[in-house]
Image (cartoon, rainbow, N blue to C red):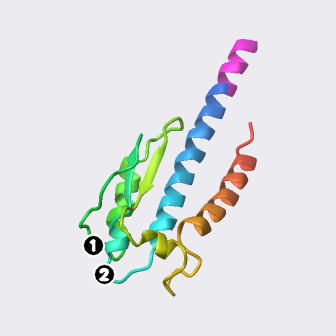
Amino acid sequence: MGFSDDIRRFTTKTTEAHNKITRVATLELFSGVIKATPVDTGRARGNWQTAPGSPVAGETERLDKSGGEAIAEVQAKTPEGAGQVTYLSNNLPYIMTLEEGSSSQAPEGMVKRNMDRVQKMVEAAARKNRV
């Protein structure tokens, strides 16, 4: 075992940790946003759409009170590794009003509060996976 083997193992270990942290953080963030979205008919939750590479344009007619379908889409469409941008989009005309706290079900909104929560999680994961 030489220096180049040590570098190769280090590179493999850091790449695996980076990929894992990126995917887990994306899944956690997107799922948290979906779950935090206020529910009436399920339209707001159902309109969260996941896409790697570029955001989705337009709305969907999906009614998803539980958020299960939208979360399944997050899991299916989030890449396994780091290096790609994955978007969570909701193009309903009132989604920003909900984010700004118009619903008593989500007075703190959905996105910002989950960004703060996941940021702390990522920092902890990075400390845990130090290589």
Q: Is residue 2 magenta?
A: yes
> Which quarter of the figure has residue 15?
top right
Counting residues from the N terminus, which is met first, the one under dot 1 or under dot 2? 2
Q: Is label 2 in a helix, a strand or a loop?
A: loop
- Which x, y percent locates residue 87? 45, 50
In the displayed structure, 100 sits above or below 82; it is: below
Residue, disc 2: 41
- Which x, y percent locates residue 45? 38, 71
Circle 2 residues within 10 Å: few <14, some 14–19, many ≥20:
few
Q: Is residue 1 visible?
A: no
Q: Is residue 61 magenta?
A: no
Q: Residue at x 30, y 57 (%)?
A: 58
Residue, disc 1: 63
Circle 1 residues within 10 Å: few <14, some 14–19, many ≥20:
some
Label 1 sits on what residue type?
A: Leu
The answer to which of 120 and 62 lies nearer the viewer is 62
Q: Which residues are magenta?
A: 1-10
The quadrant of the rendering that contains the N terminus is: top right
Check contact, mark 1 vs mark 2: CB within 8 A: yes
Q: Residue at x 56, y 82 (%)?
A: 107
The answer to which of 80 and 2 lies nearer the viewer is 80
The answer to which of 9 and 56 lies nearer the viewer is 56
Q: Residue at x 35, y 56 (%)?
A: 73
Q: Is residue 71 visible?
A: yes
In the displayed structure, 4 sits above or below 75; it is: above
Extreme residue toward the left, this view: 61
Give the left or right position of residue 21, taking residue 2 as reference. left
Label 2 sits on what residue type?
A: Thr
Secondary structure mainly formed by the magenta segment: helix
In the displayed structure, 118 sits above or below 102; it is: above
